[in-house]
Image (cartoon, rainbow, N blue to C red):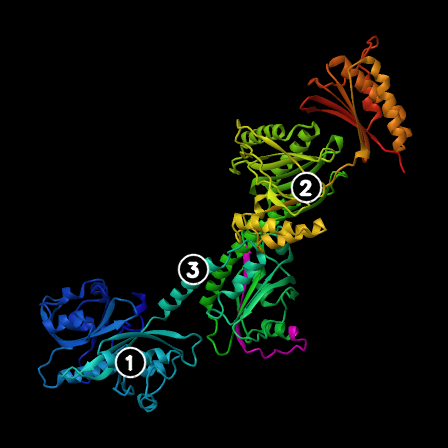
Amino acid sequence: MDDTRGVVSGEAWDTSPGGERWATAAVDAEGVIARWSAGAEALLGYRPAEAVGRAAGALLSADPPDSARRALAGGQPWSGRVTAHHRDGGRREVELLAFPLRTGEESTRWLLAAAAATPHPGHDEAMMRRAFTESGVPIAIYGTDLRLLHANEELCRVIGRTEDDMRARGTGFLPESRTNADVLRALRKVLSTGEAVNARTFHRASAEKRDRAWALSLAPLKDLAGRVTAIVLTGFEISEEYWAREGLALLNEAGIRIGTTLDVTRTAQELAGMPVPRFADFISVDLLDSVLRGDEPTPGPASGEVLMRRVAHCADAREAPEAATRIGEVASYPEASPPARCLATGRAVLTGPWDPDYRAWMGARAGNGRLPDLGVHSLVAAPLVARGNTLGVALFSRRTHTTTFAEDDLTLAEQLVGRAAVSIDNARRYTRERGTAETLQRSLLPRGLSPQSAVEVATRYLPADSQYGVGGDWFDVIPLSGSRVALVVGDVVGHGIHASATMGRLRTAVRTLADIDLPPDELLTHLDDVVGRLASENTDPVSDEDIGASCLYAVYDPVSRRLCAARAGHPPPALATPDGTVSLLELPGGPPLGLGDLPFESAEFEIPEGSTLVLYTDGLIEDRAHDITSSIDGLCEILTHPSPSLETTCDTVLRTLLSPRPEDDVALLVARTRALDAGQVVTWNLPAEPALVSDARDRAITQLAAWGLEELTFTTELVISELFTNAILHAEGPVQLRLIRDRALTCEVSDTSTTAPHLRRARVYDEGGRGLLLVAQLTDRWGTRQIPSGKAIWAEMALPAA
């Protein structure tokens, strides 16, 4: 019951002219005595320590009259005679007055005033008059015209005016109150309803720095006919309780409104905007540049002159003269300035025009050494410190028309800023991790696509909004043998460095598997095994993320103009043909990678030259701004009217389908197909007869001459001799010889055997085993791949410089 101080002080009251001493006590809503005055001790003999905490009813020798019970139950004032126990065992007849003290809560507290009963006539009226005048709580009586009729001594002391002065003005609490309208409405409600009403008001004397909060109880005084003839107002100071509750509410709101994102600047803006104007008229937030970069700040307090960057500020008024530093500018704070002092000590600093350091700092900022007239009467500088790291400073200022900061405001400012500092530090840590993950992600993506002639390509990688983190999306374009090209898009489950690192490992695995020219369905089967092994190796107790991924792998052949593709839990590609037809390719829907023991299927499509293929990750079509169906429809609509530039197409797709703050990464690959004309490819189907080796060489030499590639004659003859001879010796059936002139000259021999040749080191007396070694030494690349009829062995030679 600490909030009853100021209502009943516990000290002795003045004795009346007749020698009686007024007995006063405060009783809480449960009927327990909370305060016991010296007058009460004199009347009934109980010391305060004996009375406080006892039930007030236990001091009565008999039940109170029915009128008392009705009044008390209704929360109405009551006066009458009761019999009370004395400490010496006797009984005392006392005149008792009970006043309700309402604090805005449902429960009612009571002020009791009593004196020894006397048989003198008119004593009740005199006692009531003295109780009103000498009561330790402010009491006023208003007429039905809402003008003040009477005010007791305590109200005069609180307001700081005499009763006559207040009566001349017409009101008691109201003239100095900034909630006049609330109290007036409460008075009118009592008049209209005849029921008691609670209200709240604030008052601050000229010498005080903070408003005092008062809970008001307004009760009607009625005549015998039940008409309201006056209103009695009782004030109960609740300043300590009120400001503590306001501080807790502010901190609770700060916990909800500050730190809604993992963005340092946004969090600082939330701190600057949330407490205005409830706690300050102007707030600014300055941070160290290292915090904005996501770097690890220097631990411990900052000393000396400090350089910080203004990140956010907010003012109650449209004009804020305190905002001398613009957003984004760097401000220098000298060692003696309040911001630097709070950073050096790690504690909030209360300052204002009375502080020489404040005057010197503000005068230096004004440039003339004199204190500028900003109307600021108090300022609190609070350090932003989290986990022992100094992040910056928050400045709170108040002007002359508001309450001056007090010492207890420092604690609230520190708690408020402390909560924000943790959110800012979390955002800083996330910024650092996101930057690391994004750098890793981009370093693992192809920086420059390998030259090839099968498709024209444009790509985009767009990381998610900072709140969600960098993911594991990737794309790739891999040149294959026979002028073919592999188009790849993939998406690793999750976000952050773990997802980026997994993406890099999978991209490397895809390139390795592509080098051995596996068909798309077989490649995904092997990639599924890789993901399963990575998942089994993930024993890090810190990271419990599941490892999973989706992938689309497609191989386009510009000679046959056919596309073979397979997908693992990935959305199908979109195809726009030159005639304006747009559709999604009907690929079998394979399971995501990492499930294991489930088959993948591929499908082949004939693609007209000049068609546009769009491969993408699910972040493009699963954006919050659109559902999947509308996103796919929007993509098809864009492709219906293709742009001549694939770069423009990429930009249009992202701009149209994505929200400004995407929740997931997006990898986008747009490819326009090309075809090799008939003059660039020559094919011969020959019987598997040794005598035809020379014929095959002659045909190739003639074609090289037609292409103007005579410089490659010797190497080509050797390659054809070796590859054709191997096909005759180790396979059955016809042999196909194909020459492709593209960015390189490709010599390709196909047979019906599925056994792939391999290099070996021949011994001195071996008759064979040296042919493939010579092929490997004389060509740029060579290899083998499986085809439906068997296998194909190929070798590439660089074209002569033009």
Residue at 66% in and 73% down: 364
Figure quadrant of the C terminus: top right
Q: Which residues are magenta?
A: 364-385
Task: Please name the residue that numbered disc 1 is placed on.
Answer: 187
Q: Nearer the viewer, mark 1 or mark 2?
A: 2
Task: Please name the residue that numbered disc 2 is placed on.
Answer: 445
Mark number displayed over residue 252: 3
- Is 590 or 114 nearer to us in this picture? 590
Mark number displayed over residue 314: none
Q: Amino acid at mark 1?
A: Leu
Mark 1 touches mark 2? (CB < 8 Å)? no
Q: Nearer the viewer, mark 3 or mark 1?
A: 1
Mark 3 touches mark 1? (CB < 8 Å)? no
Figure quadrant of the N terminus: bottom left
Q: Is residue 661 above or below residue 446?
A: below
- Is 77 or 658 nearer to us in this picture? 658
Residue at disc 2, secondary structure: loop
Q: Amino acid at mark 2?
A: Leu
